[in-house]
Amino acid sequence: MSQITSDIHTGFRLATLLDWNHQQRDQRRLELAETFQAEEQLRADLRAILLRIQELGECQRRLLTDGPISSESLLDHQRYQAKLQADLKLLRQRDEQLQGERAERQAAVQEADQQVRMLEHLRDKQETSAQKRLDRYEQRTQDDLSARQHHRQHLDDSIPSLIARS
């Protein structure tokens, strides 16, 4: 019976560890989801800048075909285009960073999933083992009770014959 009590305490420790690992896995999944959201926002920002660059190019072509253009207007367009190109470069660098973060976070989620699965497997094995020990204990108890009843019945049956002999 002390083994069963030990199994209960071990089960509680394992349950606590399993709960903690579930929380860790959920946290890793949340962090991965945040990375995906950041990547989506970054892609939207990239599309917006590329659209602005395209629109700026069309505007410059129109200005050049419409006739004389002021040097001030041309310089403004060139400065704006240089700013957009710099922004585009920064966003592409950030995209590379996010891809690295995503890979790291995906690996962390996979590791956390593996830990949870391992602990769940261990819990299942312990529960099965504990149930088998409990079944064996109950069977021994039942066997002992049956043996006592049989012994008592045998005594009850033999007492009248012993009394009759005396």
Image: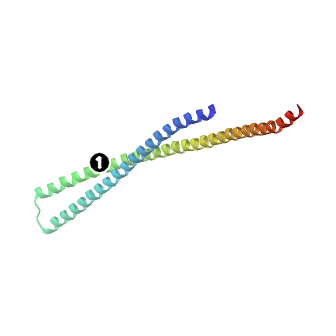
Q: Position of residue 159 (x, y in %)?
A: 82, 35
Q: Secondary structure at mark 1?
A: helix
State left or right for residue 109 relative to residue 11: left
For the point 55% across and 37% down, which residue is it? 11
Tell me: residue 133, above or below residue 77: above
Q: Quadrant of residue 2?
A: top right
State left or right for residue 116 relative to residue 59: right
State left or right for residue 94 relative to residue 155: left
Q: Position of residue 83 (x, y in %)?
A: 21, 51
For the point 25% across and 62% down, which residue is it? 54
For the point 66% across and 39% down, which residue is it? 133
Q: Position of residue 13 (x, y in %)?
A: 52, 35
Q: Quadrant of residue 80?
A: bottom left
- The quadrant of the rendering that contains the N terminus is top right
Q: Quadrant of residue 4?
A: top right
For the point 37% across and 52% down, which residue is it? 36
Q: Who is closer to the viewer here, 140 or 51?
A: 140
Category of crowding for the residue at label 1, using alpha-carbon neighbours closer than 10 angstroms: few (below 14), some (14–19), many (at least 20): few
Identify residue type, mark 1.
Leu
Residue position marked by numbered label 1 in the rendering = 90
Q: Position of residue 67 (x, y in %)?
A: 12, 67
Q: Who is closer to the viewer here, 91 or 81?
A: 91
